[in-house]
Amino acid sequence: MINLFSYIPRVLGLIIAKIKDIPVLILRTGKLRHVNIKLAFQGSFIFAEKVFASEVKDEGGRHEISPFDVDEICPVSHREMQAHIFHLEALKKRFFGRKTVSLSVPQNEASSTKLSHIDEYISTSPTYQTVPDFQRVQITGDYASGVTVEDFEMVCKGLYRALCIREKYMQKSFQRFPKTPSKYLRNIDGAAWVAKENFYPVFTPPMKKGEDPFRTDNLPENLGYHLKMKDGVVYIYPNEEAASKEEPKPLPYPNLDTFLDDMNFLLALIAQGPVKTYTHRRLKFLSSKFQVHQMLNEMDELKELKNNPHRDFYNCRKVDTHIHAAACMNQKHLLRFIKKSYQIDADRVVYSTTEKNLTLKELFVKLKMHPYDLTVDSLDVHAGRQTFQRFDKFNDKYNPVGASELRDLYLKTDNYINGEYFATIIKEVGADLVEAKYQHAEPRLSIYGRSPDEWSKLSTWFVRNRIYCPNMTWMIQVPRIYDVFRSKNFLPHFGKMLENIFMPVFEASINPQAHPDLSVFLKHITGFDSVDDESKHSGHMFSSKSPKPQEWTVEKNPSYTYYTYYMYANIMVLNCLRKERGMNTFLFRPHCGEAGALTHLMTAFMTADNISHGLNLKKSPVLQYLFFLAQIPIAMSPLSNNSLFLEYAKNPFLDFLQKGLMISLSTDDPMQFHFTKVCIWNCESSFHGSAVTNLISIHEEVGLIPGLAQWVKDPALP
């Protein structure tokens, strides 16, 4: 039998000790007026009851308090524990319900200085947003921008004007500017924000089941407009009489002086010290914020991902927004097609020389090789370390076995067999995309501007071979090789190159029925690209003193900014015309920032809907922060960069992802850089440290770049 009386002295001693501690606690807290002695005694008796229950449970083996044993015997403690757990859960739910990140700008209470316009806006801006039910970081206390108050105001005004510049050029050309920064810009202006859907681009909707993508019976009628190129820009006149009087249609034509003023402002902004300091600190904050979010919520995100039925990495939409048609197949695919074509068409005449026409068999005899002896290695189209910083050697990789004859035969649209082999290869690549269901691509076809009939030949090739795939849209790339054409006397001046590139498209937009093939082809085009080696220095600074395109007669190549401005200017006028006619419009999406000067990225910030590469953003915190604020999409190709300009370990892809830039993965040239059939997955598998949720979020953004999300309804896309 347990001797309960033996525990009474010990319990009373503990109670007395607890009561003696009450005055001490009261004195320490400084609350002498409102002490509830009854509560103090009640707490002491609860404590004594716990000790008593603990001692009763195990008389022989325990002489100390065991908090782990109290729950089972003491009902009072059990109820208190339940209440405590309920209280913690309530606090947790209340914390999740806040969903706030507060940034406080300290103000000196003794100062009577009136807030500036920007400071007043910051202090009255909403500090909440609708976010998932994950743990959030709350920042309290003094907020240091890293610069003085005067510099801070100057920085904010500069960033505000830079965003307004981009918004202006995007709206004029019917390209995209995000709604969120647009709302904040209107709030700063003191104006009400109104969604202007008429300023957004127009994409061709997908073909319905059974609909012919090449039909020409529904083409619009001729408007009878007159066209004239003036200072490198196509002007539209209602008729010839208006053209003779220089009275063009009232469209938003570009203004070169305004463009140069805006460009000079951005050039000064990215060089200012306080702006560099502020943007650098903000980018570091964004990166740290991502790291903290990942540590707090990685497992919750993974849990939510697993609970999402029929949706994982393999069946979310993957769009290759930067891929060149001439290298859209992997090298094994090309080798297999060469052998297959030789097996079927060995005696077919496929190539023409100055002496005679050659069959496929005779062509290989001339090259002193046999297709069955070829291997992936002997094909020699893969870019290795020997092409690093050597863009000239990289271009040679487009020639299988180093033979330009095979490139003309298999990878060109204009040859003796009218590009039949090239069309077949592309249709096989498209069939693979359709079979995979969740993969899409946007190959680029070339228009060089050497002659005005390039558009007609390319569109005829497209329609004749019926190159349509529901998982493909197309882009036009314009190589910046005017110097090559001028040195061979193919072009009299740069203005003629611009005329050959844009005039046929304007004519087909005005009178589609006179150009049926080109009109059908343009329905499947989403934008224009400008491509070439950015590391080549032109030595020309675009300014008001630069010669007009018709005056550029030297063999020297114009600068990147010069090319970009005149391409943007003509696309802007073209989009206004096509928007008026209810046709699809085009985006300007150049290669930019792979190498060369920072002015490339600055010009693209003003004119481009999105860009490819963007590596040099890591050299300019100001431009990088502006690209973040404007959410300009960037299609990055780490495996391509690894063979040309930047080692894989130094690629800023993950850094840009963590900072919140809108980036996506792309293949660039699968034939040169990839081995597998599903090349875009090869890109993603190389990022060993990336969580699955990060990879899926990349594809959420990549679907926004080509306008695919407007038509493809997928839970993984917004």
Image: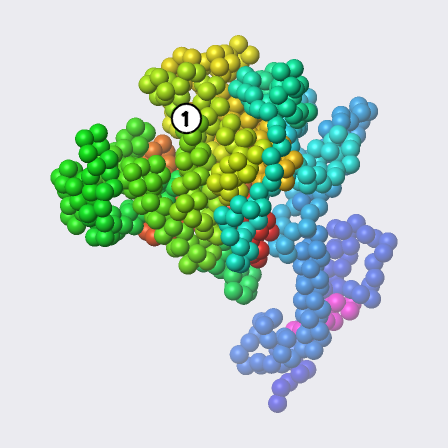
Tell whether position 599 is magenta: no
Q: Nearer the viewer, residue 565 or 690?
A: 565
Q: Is residue 455 visible from the viewing direction of this image?
A: yes
Q: Secondary structure at mark 1?
A: loop
Q: Residue furthest bottom?
A: 1
Vertical placement of 196 versus 694: above or below? Answer: above
Q: Nearer the viewer, residue 84 or 661?
A: 661
Vertical placement of 592 versus 411: above or below? Answer: above
Q: Which residues are magenta?
A: 41-51
Tell me residue 12's x, y (percent): 71, 72
Q: Residue at x 42, y 37 (%)?
A: 458
Vertical placement of 544 versus 306: above or below? Answer: above
The answer to which image quadrant residue 156 occupies is top right
Tell me residue 541's x, y (percent): 48, 15
- In the image, 16: left or right of 484? right
Q: Is residue 379 visible from the viewing direction of this image?
A: no
Disc 1 crowd rating (10 Å Cα; few below 14, some 14-19, many 20+) is some
- Disc tally is 1
Residue designated by label 1? 451
Q: Residue at x 51, y 27 (%)?
A: 503
The answer to which image quadrant residue 66 occupies is bottom right
Tell me which secondary structure the magenta stretch mostly adopts.
helix
Tell whether position 42 is magenta: yes
* Dot 1 amino acid type: Ser
Q: Residue at x 54, y 53 (%)?
A: 207
Rendered-image quadrant of the N terminus: bottom right
Q: Nearer the viewer, residue 108 or 607?
A: 607
